[in-house]
Amino acid sequence: MIAARELTKTYTFHQQRAGLGGALRSLVRRNYETRLAVDRIGFEIGRGEVVGLLGPNGAGKTTTLKMLSGLLYPTSGELAVLGHRPSERKHDYLRRIALVMGQKSMLWWDVPAMESLLLHKEMYGLSTAEFERNVDELAELLDVRELLDVQVRKTSLGERMKLELMAALVHGPEILFLDEPTIGLDVVAKARVRSFLAEVNKLRGTTILITSHDMDDIEALCSRVMIIDHGRLQFDGALDELVRTARPRKLVRATYAAPLGDGVLAGVEGVSGVEVDGLTVRLEVDRDRAGDVLGALTRLGPLVDLDVADADVEDIMRDLFERRGEPS
Ligand SMILES: Nc1ncnc2c1ncn2[C@@H]1O[C@H](COP(=O)(O)OP(=O)(O)OP(=O)(O)O)[C@@H](O)[C@H]1O
C-alpha cells in the first residue's frame, strides 16, 4: 500500500542575517544552504496497519509525512502510495488519503464546522447519502454532534481536534497521516482521540501512520514503530521488539518488612541505579540477569511486595537517542 525506497529530501534555503542591514545584504548576495532532512529511507506499510513514526525533534518525521501526502517533492528515491506517486497530487490519490497536522487547522475558523464538511463534500464529490452516512458515523464516534453548528473558533482545543479528525475522515480515506494529533490536548482529550483512531482502524480498516512525542499514543495504537534520527531510518519493527532490544532492562521495586542496611546488592552483577527509600528498594536489572537478582532480593530480608516492569517506551527512546549522541 505504501512503498518507499531510498527516499530522500534535501531542503535548499537561504540564510538571512538579522536586522535591516542583513535583509539588504541578502538582497545582493544570498547565502544558500542545504539541509538533508530525510536520508535514503525505505519501508513498506500494508493495508490496515497502524505504524508509529518516532524520532527526536528535527529527525525528519514531518518531512516524511509531507512527501507521503504529496505536499513535498522528494529530492530523490522512489515513493508509491496506493499505486500513485504522491507528488503528482492526482485527484484520485487525494481522495483516498488524509493528512492531519496537530499544529495546523483545515477548518474555517469563522463558520461552523459543518460548513467545512460541506466544502469537503463538494471537493471530494461525495453523494449526499455517502456524506450523511459518514457524518453520522463520525459524529457518533467522536461525540461531536452538537458541535457541528458552533463557530469553530468558539470550540476548545480538544473539541477542535475532534472536528479536525472528522473533517479529515469525512471523505472516507484509506490512509490517514497524522502529525502530532494529540499535541496540547489534556489527558482526557488525548485518550478520546486515541480510542477514536483505534476504532476507525478497526471499523474501516484505515491504514494509519502517526507521529507523536507522546509515547502513550504510540503504545495505545501502534504495534509497529519506525524510528528516524538525523533523517535515517534506525529501526523498523514491533514495539515490543524495540523494548527488548533497545534497553533490555527491567525495573524492579521490592518492599521489605524491615529497613535495609547500606550497600544493598553491591557487587551483584547486572544491577544498576539502586535506590533505597525506607523499606523499599528500586533498581534496574539486565533482563538476562533478572532471575539471579530476584534470588538475591529474596535473601535480603522478608519481602512484602515485589513489582517487576519493563522500562516504559519514553525511557527507552530517551536512552536510545542519548546513546546515539554519545561518541562510540
Ligand atoms: N522548509 C524547510 N526549509 C529548510 N529546512 C527545513 C524545512 N522544514 C524542515 N527543515 C529541516 O529539516 C529537518 C527535519 O525537519 P522535520 O520537520 O521533518 O523534523 P521532525 O522530525 O518532524 O521534527 P519535530 O519533531 O520537531 O516536528 C530539520 O533539521 C528542519 O530544521
Image (tube, rainbow, N blue to C red):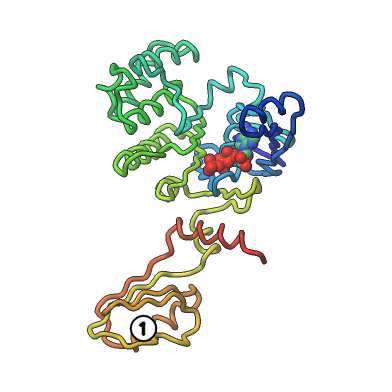
Viewer-proximal residue among 46 and 169:
169
Residue 223 in sight in this render = yes
Residue in the picture at 32% in, 88% down: 261
Q: Position of residue 97 (x, y in %)?
A: 53, 27
Q: Position of residue 252 (x, y in %)?
A: 38, 73
Residue in the picture at 36% in, 83% down: 297
Figure quadrant of the N terminus: top right
Residue 45 in sight in this render = no
- What kind of element bears circle 1? helix
Please identify the residue farthest to the front as the structure is shown: 21
Viewer-proximal residue among 258 and 276:
276
What amino acid type should be assigned to the residue bearing mark 1?
Leu
Check the image and report above or below for 287 versus 71. below
Check the image and report above or below for 10 versus 54. above
The picture quadrant for ligand 1 comes to top right
Would you say 4 lies left or right of 164 here? right
Residue in the picture at 58% in, 44% down: 58
The residue that mark 1 highlights is: 297
Location of residue 280 (image quadrant): bottom left
Q: How many marks?
A: 1
- Label 1 crowding class (10 Å Cα cut-off): few <14, some 14-19, many 20+? many
Figure quadrant of the C terminus: bottom right
Would you say 63 lies left or right of 32 here? left
Please identify the residue farthest to the right as the structure is shown: 29
Location of residue 155 (image quadrant): top left
Check the image and report above or below for 263 versus 125. below
Would you say 185 lies left or right of 322 here? left
Please identify the residue farthest to the left as the structure is shown: 257
Q: Position of residue 129 (x, y in %)?
A: 38, 13
Q: Position of residue 57 (x, y in %)?
A: 55, 46
Residue in the picture at 52% in, 61% down: 319
